[in-house]
Image (spheres, helix red, strand yellow):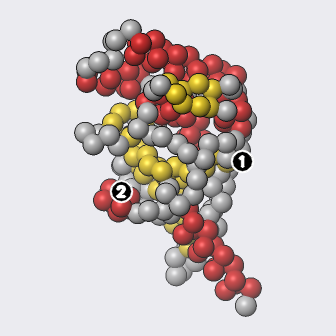
Amino acid sequence: MCSASSGSVACTSRRSLLAGLIAVPAAELLLPSVRPAHAETQSFAEDAVDEYSRLEASGKLTNAKALENIRAKFNFKRSIDGRVFVKSSKGTFFAVRLDMEVPGAMLFRDTSNGQIFALQTTTLQQIDLSNDQVVILLLSDGEWEREMSPIQFDDEDGKTNTLTLSENDFRNVVGLISMAEGAGQDGAGQEAK
């Protein structure tokens, strides 16, 4: 369980946090199985948050360059307006935002091709992506890459496609997961007829 106070994040267990990560149930998704957190990723994320906290407490994160460097070390960056972009193991950046209709859900947009992915936590109902420590805790170890699921749909020809959105559409959509779930229920009802 994690809590935030005075600008810092405290977690009792990284394992319990990641155990709550589930693949997003959406319309006809091919969902990967949920993998339990490993001790090394738990230690990495906690050590990363500790390092960030020490640097912040010692006054070493007071300028833009220092913030850019520590964020790059933990594989993310922020745009000028504060939006989060997380770096994949292949070097591609994914824009990250919350799905405003589903508590604890994050949406990811691959900046190289516009494909949309989702990840939902069961342990965190509110996620503050404006806090670097929360971003580090949730995304620095790379587990998000294995745990996220593509938001997919079947086209008129029955072919399964991953949803693609422009950056502007991705920024402006309120939520995608509940829409995908609704489409899946509608589709299931039509097939049963």
Residue 120: image location, x then y, percent = 60, 49
Give the residue displayed 46% in from the left and 17% down from the top.
Answer: 53
Separation (CA) of disc 1 from disc 2: 28 Å
Q: Using the rendered view, name the quadrant where residue 154 is placed.
A: bottom right
Q: Amino acid at mark 2?
A: Arg
**Dots 1 and 2: beta carbons under 8 Å?**
no
Q: Using the rendered view, name the quadrant where residue 77 is placed.
A: top left
Q: Amino acid at mark 1?
A: Ser
From the image, tell me which residue sits under label 2. 171
From the image, tell me which residue sits under label 1. 33
- The answer to whether one can see residue 42 in this image is yes
Is disc 2 placed on a helix, strand or loop?
Answer: helix
Task: Using the image, determine if residue 91 lies above or below residue 171.
Answer: above
Give the quadrant of the N terminus. top right
Give the residue displayed 37% in from the left and 26% down from the top.
Answer: 72
Q: Is residue 178 left or right of residue 163?
A: right
In front here: 149 or 113? 149
